[in-house]
Amino acid sequence: MAPFQESGPVLDGFIPVDAEDIPVMTESTSSSAGHAMHGMDGEDLGVELAKVAYDVKGGDIRLLHVADLVYWTSYLLMVSVFSRPQLQAVLVRMQRRGQDLGRNPSLGASGKSAWEVLDYGDVVVHVMTPEQRDFYDLESFYGAAEEVDLPFLKEEQKFGGDWMKTQTL
């Protein structure tokens, strides 16, 4: 191997390039800007995926805005599931819904673990059993994160409260 040379190759197969040839990540080329073309920002995607989990009876669904706390994503979606078939159903339906919205995770889940992750870039989804969730306690790492209101949960709670008031024993 040749010693370092300012004007020539240093490693076999390495082709030096000028700095002008290296693409620079800008807002127009970033993943979140690309997602905006589909009319779907991270919060909207997170809410949509949370609704999918809710429809498959996922529990303790929380969407956290973590953009001010971490550099690698804007939202974390946490979902508890109570069986492997339910975990697989949540994953499959989330991936399908993401595809419907023009979004595909860069990291897919196998459905073979008690904790699976789907990475949509600006939204990272954690689907896990209550035991895994309690053990790893991810929410405590992001205690300063703002929790995003999930409108379908609010409506159910409101409806449930009104319904209970109208029932007699």
Image: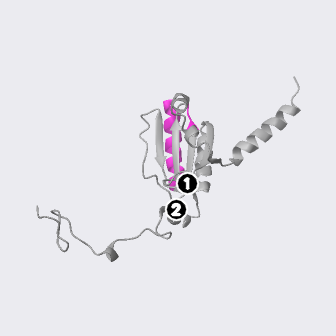
Magenta span has 14? no
The residue identified by callout 1 is 74
Magenta span has 84? yes
Q: Secondary structure at mark 2?
A: helix
Which badge, 1 or 2, comes first in the chain's sequence? 2
Q: In the rendered view of the protein, which quadrant contains the N terminus?
A: bottom left
Q: Is residue 87 left or right of residue 64?
A: left
Residue 20: name its quadrant. Answer: bottom left
Residue 161: name its quadrant. Answer: top right
Q: Main secondary structure of the magenta part?
A: helix
The residue identified by callout 2 is 32
The x, y position of residue 131, in whole percent, is 53, 27
Judging depth in this view, the residue of 105 and 14 nearest the camera is 14
Judging depth in this view, the residue of 67 and 123 nearest the camera is 67
**Pointer 2: residues within 10 angstroms few (<14), some, or many (20+)?**
some
The x, y position of residue 105, in whole percent, is 46, 52
Q: Residue at x 84, y 37 (%)?
A: 162
Three-letter code for the amino acid on which mark 2 is drawn:
Ser
Q: Is residue 126 left or right of residue 109?
A: right
In the image, the segment drawn in magenta is 79-99
Q: Is residue 37 above or below residue 56?
A: below
Three-letter code for the amino acid on which mark 1 is drawn:
Ser
Q: Residue furthest left?
A: 1
Measure the alpha-carbon separation of dots 1 and 2: 9 Å
Q: Secondary structure at mark 1?
A: loop
Q: Residue at x 61, y 42 (%)?
A: 143
Residue 158: name its quadrant. Answer: top right
